Image: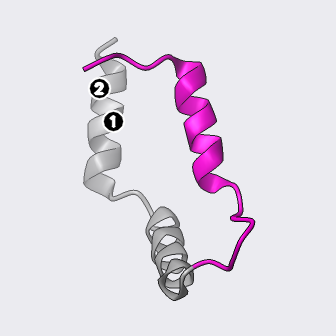
Amino acid sequence: MASKRMSDVKKNDEHMHSPKKAGKRPDWASGLRQLYDSVVEEPLPDSFSDLLSKLDSED
C-alpha cells in the first residue's frame, strides 16, 4: 500500500467536506451530525482523565 503525503490527505479531506454542487445532503446526514456533536460534547470520564494524569506524571 502506498503511503500518502499530508498534502494529499488534506486535499482529500477538504474535498469530502465541501458542499456538493448538484443536490442537497441526504436525509440521514443531519441525524448523523447531531449524533456526532452529542458524542463530542460528552464530558471526559474520570477514569480516563486519571489515566492521562498518570501518564503525564511519568515524563
- Crowding near the residue tagged with mark 1, few <14, some 14–19, many ≥20 C-alpha atoms within 10 Å: few
Q: In which quarter of the image is the N terminus?
A: top left
Q: Vertical placement of 30 versus 57: above or below?
A: below
Which is nearer the eye, 20 or 47? 20
- Expressed as whole percent of the image width and height from the top left, the position of residue 19 reads 71, 63
Which residue type carries mark 1? Leu
Position of residue 32 relative to residue 21, above or below, is below
Distance, label 2 to label 1, CA atoms, is: 5 Å
Q: Mark 2 points at which residue?
A: 55
**42 on left or right of 49:** right
Q: Are marks 2 and 1 in contact (CB under 8 Å)?
A: yes
Q: Residue at x 56, y 38 (%)?
A: 12
Residue 24 position (above or below residue 46): below
Which stretch did the figure color magenta?
1-25
Residue 2 painted magenta? yes
Q: Residue 52 has which mark?
A: 1
Quick check: is 5 in the magenta stretch?
Answer: yes
18 vs 50, nearest the viewer = 18
* Element type where label 1 sits in the image: helix
